[in-house]
Image: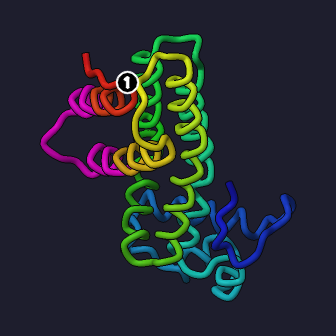
Amino acid sequence: MRSRIDRRQPQRSDQRRAAILDALNQHLMETGFDSLDIAKVARQAGVGRSAFYFYFENKAAAVAALLEPMHDALMAANNILANTDKPPRTRIRDTIDAVLRTAEDHRYLFRAMLEARGTSGSVRDLWDAARESFVPTVSAVIAAERASGRAPAGADPVVLAGLLLEFNDRLLERAIVGGPLTRQQLLDGAEAIWMGTIYGATQ
């Protein structure tokens, strides 16, 4: 998923954009989002500041572009839910575990995105759009489970899907930023919430 707030939609052969993102990635690992210096990033990438802003509105937009692989991994995790070859509880637990692992694998990027979301309206919009891109799959699963008789009738599947994904946002934030619950507790609790919402059962 290419960031929609890139200033320019580049071709694969555009080496300057790749160099900027590589340098940005290195600086994020070393300093975090708040301490990012665009001049240093541009210098390490071998370009001028103007080249950076040719591609990205600001540093928050560039961080959003770095998260494209994370979005792809989350989409793959979302597809686990749609695999009806496995029991519902297994699918839900495996999906949530994969979502948590994806955030853990991209921990410093996820932290940077959380910080960027707090300072950039365009990044917040991108974040919301990315989350909404998962709604069709989740709502289709809910509708299919109801049609098969495995899940009871209830509220609009699209509404439920949106709320469950909003919950996952908060789940990931607590998993990465930290809180009183362990990873296991977060996983168990999230599984119960998803099971209860879709199937009316937590046991």
Q: How would you rate the neighbour count of disc 1 (Cα within 10 Å): few for under 14, some for 14-19, many for 20 or more?
A: many
Residue 180 coordinates in the image, percent (x, y): 12, 42
* Magenta stretch contains residue 46: no
Of residues 176 and 127, the one drawn nearer to the viewer in this rendering: 127
Residue 61 coordinates in the image, percent (x, y): 56, 72
Q: Amino acid at mark 1?
A: Tyr
Of residues 150 and 65, the one drawn nearer to the viewer in this rendering: 150
- What residue did someone put label 1 on? 199
Secondary element type, mark 1 = helix
As displayed, is residue 54 above or below residue 148? below
As displayed, is residue 185 above or below residue 129? above
**Left or right: 172 in relation to 7:** left
**Left or right: 95 in relation to 169:** right
Q: Which residues are magenta?
A: 169-190
Q: Quadrant of the N terminus?
A: bottom right
* Magenta stretch contains residue 185: yes
Q: Residue at x 85, y 64 (%)?
A: 11
As displayed, is residue 121 above or below residue 177? below
**Left or right: 158 in relation to 119:** right
Q: Residue at x 35, y 32 (%)?
A: 194
Q: Main secondary structure of the magenta part?
A: helix
